[in-house]
Amino acid sequence: MRWEVLLKKHIYALGGAGLLLSVSMLALPAQELTGELPDPPEFAAQSEPNFVSISDILEFRALPEYHEPDWVTSKYVETGKLPPVAERLPKEPMVYKAANMPDGIGVYGDTMRHVIGGRPEGWNYIGGQSQGWGGIDIGLSECLTRTGPLFEVKADELEPMPNLAKSWEWSEDGHQLTMHLIEGAKWSDGDPFDSEDVMFYWNDNILDPNVSPLNGGTPETFGEGTTLEALDAYTIRWTFKEVRPTQYLYAMAYGTFCPGPSHILKPEHPKYNADNTYEEYKNAFPPEYMNIPVMGAWVPVEYRPDDIIVMRRNPYYWKVDENGNQLPYLNEMHYRLSTWADRDVQAVAGSGDFSNLEQAESYVEALRRSAEDSAPARLQFGARTIGYALRMNLSGNGWGEPDERGQAVRELNRNLDFRKAVTMAVDRQRLGDSLVRGPFTAIYPGGLYAGTTYYDKDSTVYYPYNLEAANALLDGLGLMDTDGNGIRNFPEGTAGGADVEITVLANTDYGTDTNLAEGVIAQMEPLGLRVIANFQSGTARDDIAQSGQYDWSVERQGSEMVSVVQGTAALAPTGPRTSYFHRAGSDGTVDLLPFETELVDVVNKFIASSDNAERAELMKQYQRLYTENVYSVGLTQYPGALIINKRFANIPAGAPIFMFNWAEDNIIRERVFVPEDKQGDYELHPETLPGEPGGAGPM
């Protein structure tokens, strides 16, 4: 309703909804439709990172002795239920250095209480199941490399951190990369982690077209024609067509190369179990299945539908501090199943401990509350790394099996004048103000985010709000209101000359997503386009998006628009399944538009280059191609804030809620602790450890 009022006022000021320029507008040069992009309003981040080298953060080495919580030793080791801690750790565990810990070596105990709006589908992450987001998967999964903490790594030393792959080296010709896995590490049930787990993920999940790992890992993510082989239990070798494509090391981090427990998953995979379908494989480990083996710091031990997920410390976790204390310090993790808006409310109030404050509608109240002396949580804003876009389905070749109407919409989506008309009908200032007033939101035309490393304003083409010009462009396409109902019609012979009706997909888990989608719907009305909401919960929305069964989608973009070096393959349709909104049809090919071919070429050159100056120039080309051709319609851009209870220690300065990864990874939760005098009585399963896989709960 608020949008209708705003738009009616605006239309009245123009002199009526029917005020259009003549079709001669179409003869204007393209540059006369563009304008000066306003600079984002000043908004200073509250803290800056302390930049260090990766070698200042961690190393792999054996220590003289190792320790664990006393209760683990007395209740589990001395009673014969667990081997001694030294036998549960790798030959050379990962060691976090005390000098990089803001508050030094920690102490054991306490709980971090998360609140999330998602709901878990199950625990088969590599088979495509969502655990509910909010940091659950980050707490369970470990990947070959790690990127979250890179926000504090010196720019001239930036490269992915070692993780399950402790080291690697390139061949002389640069086509092969040999990786050495951490030796002697174990899954949380004690089963050895080795190259079999890696190869199962690669061969039977990534390469299997019937499996869609969560977060979109595909063969193209790691380069067209790339192969992977195991040389022995702890050595794997990649072979790439490109020379030294260091870019793929970023793709081996969360969430596109995080192996699952092959000893548990393989028996359910159709390749090894002829009685199972792929759907049965994906759903073989529902949320009620407890104690799924993980390489992460915590293991799920309790699930109450629409209430809570509880995770307990992993007794086989393979990381320690410099004193030999096995991590994590925190014994328990809670994920209260509520709403994303409630996450912010509870974190500010102190009944929750952690939140990535990213719903702009909550900013003013959160700032007011955190400024009070009695506030239990601290709030830290970062850079504007949250950006929303209207993405159009550009696949004209059958992806998602559109009907006649849907196919007609896709042909419109593939027309540049149509995309220009849509972007010029979006009043971005009003969209931003509808979320939050103040210096938070910035006008975002699409492409790379202002303020990030590779952004270049001079390479950014901006089509300002111009409803008259937008209507003229649609007139020129022959989209006229032939039946007088206020909605433009397809030309005769296309979709039966019906009204131009377009569905827009959005996620109901996030108020910002639906608010922006509602704004887009309202702002298309004066353009004579009927846009119909298709609002779905997270998992249902993901399934629709992954299958291509949508016309438009309003969504928050990923890390590729922030860091560029993370998720780079998704910047363009570099493969049949790399793009979020333009994928191959049933014939396996992508029907690229001419400018997309140029985009793919630029992205591939970026991936193959290690020259920083060349990369910067390539991203200038990318930004111009993207924004000039309205590859997606930018909506708004704004900062996020980390909210964390003041009792927690070892929170690094300047940790963003999202850059290379989410804040749950950025703050290195396994190092976070609560000083003894601040610990609370929050553990639901004190002095217990995960039980048998599939068992009823903790030991």
Image (cartoon, rainbow, N blue to C red):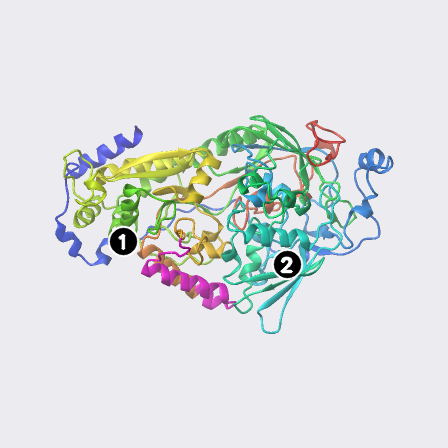
Residue 53: which numbered mark, if any? 2
Q: Main SS type for the magenta part?
A: helix
**Side of 402 where 308 appears, left or right:** right
The residue tagged 1 is: 416
**Side of 389 where 101 appears, left or right:** right
Quarter of the rendering occupied by the C terminus: top right
**Side of 374 where 601 appears, left or right:** left
Viewer-side residue, 583 vs 281:
281
Which stretch is magenta? 587-616
The percent coordinates of residue 65 (x first, y second) are 84, 49
Mark 1 Cα shell of 10 Å, populated few (<14), some (14-19), many (≥20): some
- Amino acid under label 2? Ser
Viewer-side residue, 397 vs 179:
397
Q: Is residue 661 above or below residue 695?
A: below
The percent coordinates of residue 160 (x first, y second) are 59, 57
Quarter of the rendering occupied by the N terminus: top left
Q: Write the residue at 22% across / 33% down.
A: 9
For residue 277: magenta?
no
Viewer-side residue, 602 vs 193:
193
Q: CA distance from mark 1 to mark 2?
A: 45 Å
Q: Quadrant of residue 495?
A: top left
Viewer-side residue, 429 vs 329:
329
Q: Comparing marks 1 and 2, which lies closer to the viewer?
A: 1
Mark 2 Cα shell of 10 Å, populated few (<14), some (14-19), many (≥20): some
Residue 67: which numbered mark, if any? none
- Amino acid under label 1? Leu
- Helix, strand, or loop for circle 1? helix
Circles 1 and 2, Cβ within 8 Å, touching? The answer is: no
Q: Write the residue at 20% across / 41% down.
A: 496
The percent coordinates of residue 438 (x first, y second) are 39, 38
